[in-house]
Image (spheres, rainbow, N blue to C red):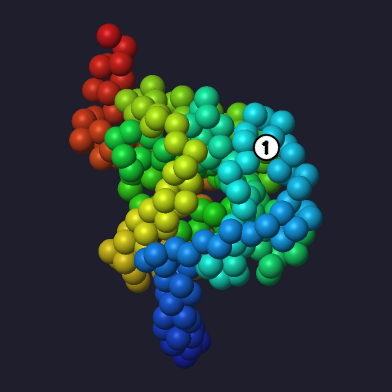
């Protein structure tokens, strides 16, 4: 049993690290998210090329904020009224030159929503039901938007519906999403901490790829639609 001492050491190290990871996650999932508006001059310069691409896609700028989680990203939010979709371009101080983008469409029944992102780290935490997430690492903004629209169309075909457009709802939507994710994380903290650690180390995520190909999607749809089966939903909408 030569492996035994090494295994004990690894286990002891894990027991030390896990509480630190747990506390770090909780700090990034505050009960009441704080957002501070920032002026144009405070927006990092490397955000502007991606911001222009959002505007070329027909998105209207809502404003810019500093989001008070570690490492305090600066985010510029957008909205496209004809889709009811929010877009966000953000930059973190700990990753110089790293700019990430995503799209989110709130859906009914609330609080359903689909988020599409281009950073694999965005899929490290377990999502709160009935939130849907799809990650396309490194996807250009234009491709990410097209894939997001495909995902929304799929979910609407399965029985969900878009919410009425609400350009003033961005801040509250973001706060609610963080709060629900904190609650979901707290229901199984040890399991979720281990899952997050594994995903970060392995650079993997169950949310990678289109929502329609993810194993967890049918169960999420059942929950969102009052536990009707996926087949029942599609039969209902094919009549």
Say which quarter of the image contains residue 67: bottom right
- Residue found 45% across the figure and 59% down from its top: 125
Q: Give me the residue at 43% from left, 77% from top.
A: 23
- Camera-side residue of 82 and 232: 82
> What secondary structure is found at the residue carrying circle 1?
helix
Q: Residue at x 67, y 30 (%)?
A: 57
Q: Is residue 40 above or below residue 94?
A: above
Residue 128 in view here: yes
Say above or below: 115 vs 84: below
Q: Mark yes or no: residue 150 visible.
A: no
- Viewer-closest of 175 and 236: 175
Residue in view at x 32 percent, y 61 percent: 183
User: Where does residue 195 sit, x and y in percent of width and height?
Assistant: 43, 63
15 and 171: which is toward the camera: 171
Q: Position of residue 218 (x, y in %)?
A: 33, 35
Residue behind mark 1: 54
Residue 4 is situated, as x and y percent measured from the top left of the image, at 44, 87
Q: Is residue 99 above or below residue 156?
A: below
């Amino acid at each position: 049993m030569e492996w035994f001492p090494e295994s004990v050491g690894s286990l002891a190290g894990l027991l030390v690290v896990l509480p630190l990871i747990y506390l770090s996650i909780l700090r990034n999932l505050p009960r009441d998210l704080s957002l501070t508006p920032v002026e144009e001059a405070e927006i990092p310069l490397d955000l502007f090329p991606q911001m222009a691409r959002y505007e070329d896609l027909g998105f209207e700028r809502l404003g810019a904020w500093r989001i008070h989680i570690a490492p305090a990203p600066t985010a510029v939010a957008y909205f496209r009224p004809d889709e009811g979709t929010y877009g966000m371009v953000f930059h973190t101080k700990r990753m110089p030159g790293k700019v990430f983008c995503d799209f989110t469409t709130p859906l009914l029944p609330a609080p359903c929503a689909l988020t599409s992102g281009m950073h694999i780290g965005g899929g490290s935490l377990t999502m709160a039901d009935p939130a849907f997430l799809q990650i396309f690492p490194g996807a250009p903004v234009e491709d990410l938007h097209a894939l997001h629209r495909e995902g929304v169309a799929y979910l609407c075909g399965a029985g969900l519906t878009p919410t009425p457009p609400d350009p003033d709802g961005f801040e509250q939507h973001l706060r609610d999403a963080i709060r629900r994710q904190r609650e979901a994380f707290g229901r199984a903290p040890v399991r979720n901490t281990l899952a997050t650690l594994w995903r970060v180390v392995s650079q993997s995520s169950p949310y990678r790829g289109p929502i329609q190909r993810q194993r967890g999607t049918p169960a999420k749809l059942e929950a969102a639609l009052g536990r009707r089966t996926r087949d029942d939903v599609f039969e209902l909408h094919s009549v």
